[in-house]
Image (spheres, rainbow, N blue to C red):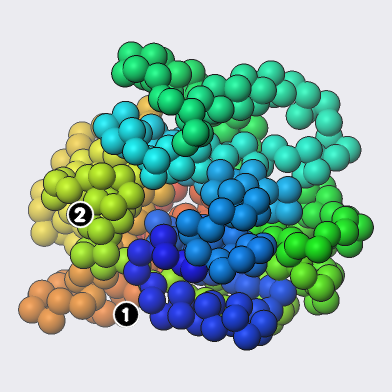
Amino acid sequence: MFENIIGHQRIVSQLTQEVEHKMLPGGLLFYGDPYSGKLSTALELARVLTCKQSGKWSCICSSCRQHRVLDHPYLLMLGSRYFNEEIAAAADTLQHSRSEGARFLFIRAVRKLTRRFDPMLWEGNESKLKKIQDPITKLEEELENFYPEVELPEERKLEKSLKKISSYCMELEKVVPRDTIPIDQIRAVNLWVHTSSSDQSKVVILENADKMGDASRNALLKTLEEPPEGTYFILLSARKGRILPTILSRVRHYYFPQRSSDVAAQVLQKIFRISSPEYSDLRSFFLAWRGVPLEKLRAQSEHFFSYVWGDSEWEPEKLDEFLQDSQLKLYFIPFLKELSETLGTYMTDSQSTLPVSYGVLESWNRKIKTALINFEHYNQAPDLLLEGLLYSMKEMV
């Protein structure tokens, strides 16, 4: 079991022992940086929990066959994700590889999106689900052509089919709530786990669990206090500190550290069939599929700090061009990440001579986090947040 998880040997060993000795809790929290394998591990755990045999990835039991294509009836998935970047990367892998593994990679990437439209989650809001039923149906019809037992079409037809699926997915992703997990969906989950009966384990995966509003958190809390037997809630988050302490106290914590460059290279090579050193890590790989110019953001980050502490002459036209970019909403979070990483380099480099104290650097880091919260949770304009951040940091020098 867990053979398809690359890296994270400590977590894999812990989960394996807990499953084998029936010590797994009903509530789990997988937290750590984005792209660190939290969802992959959660999905593998869900498969192992419902497996009727040994738990190996190659198991041929009906439950494992359903889980390999994310079509198991006792798996629910909620929350936002970088769906279309992953789908685009998986489609590219399938075009170049055409292997069974590439088929599963693509099917699972698409299903990570479509499982958000499980009718169970939309009870009481069927009118909205009805509006998108047509693209979901067409998408599923196209997806059937990629199952391992079906012969793949020739290259041109394959490319055409992949483009169709991609267009349907782009349409569907707009409907997935990005900033929260709605209270209606949490209530639907609570009803499902308490009323549906099964001899198999039921698994609920909540991605970006830190984005739940107060009502959703409180509704989930009631079920987490005493999950029904055989039911498992797996919460995923890159921001553990934004999850309610009352929820944290009711789940077991599993920390997913950032993958090393060597492990990231293994993931790119084994999963996405990429062996070139073009991408330094998984973050840069997925951001490239989103169309985020990471090198540009890094250059802007250096220019930003050079102005803040006065080591270079201010060139407002450079930053103004960035501020006015029509894609700033797309760039903003990755840019803040670059600012944080640059700050981290300064804070750990004993050879660097900076015109500010270590305490000021920590204050700057807090301001960056505040800007992120104001953008994600309060929908404040990114250009104003960035200008405010720049000048507030400049005043502290």
Task: Write down the residue under mark 1.
Answer: 359
* First of labels 1, 2 by sequence position: 2
- Residue 316's place in the image compared with 196, above or below, is above
| Quarter placement of the C terminus | bottom left
Above or below: residue 3 compared with residue 58: below
Nearer to us of marks 1 and 2 is 2
Q: Nearer the viewer, residue 244 or 61?
A: 61
Return the mark for residue 280: 2
Q: Residue at x 69, y 18 (%)?
A: 134
Q: Residue, x 64% and y 32% (percent of image)?
A: 175
Q: Residue at position x 64%, y 44% from top? A: 71
Q: Residue at x 22, y 63 (%)?
A: 261
Question: Viewer-proximal residue, 352 or 63?
Answer: 63
Q: Is disc 2 surrounded by few (<14), some (14 to 19) or many (20+) residues within 10 Å?
A: some
- Report whether residue 136 is seen: yes
Q: Position of residue 147 (x, y in %)?
A: 50, 34
Judge whether residue 33 can be spotted in this image: no
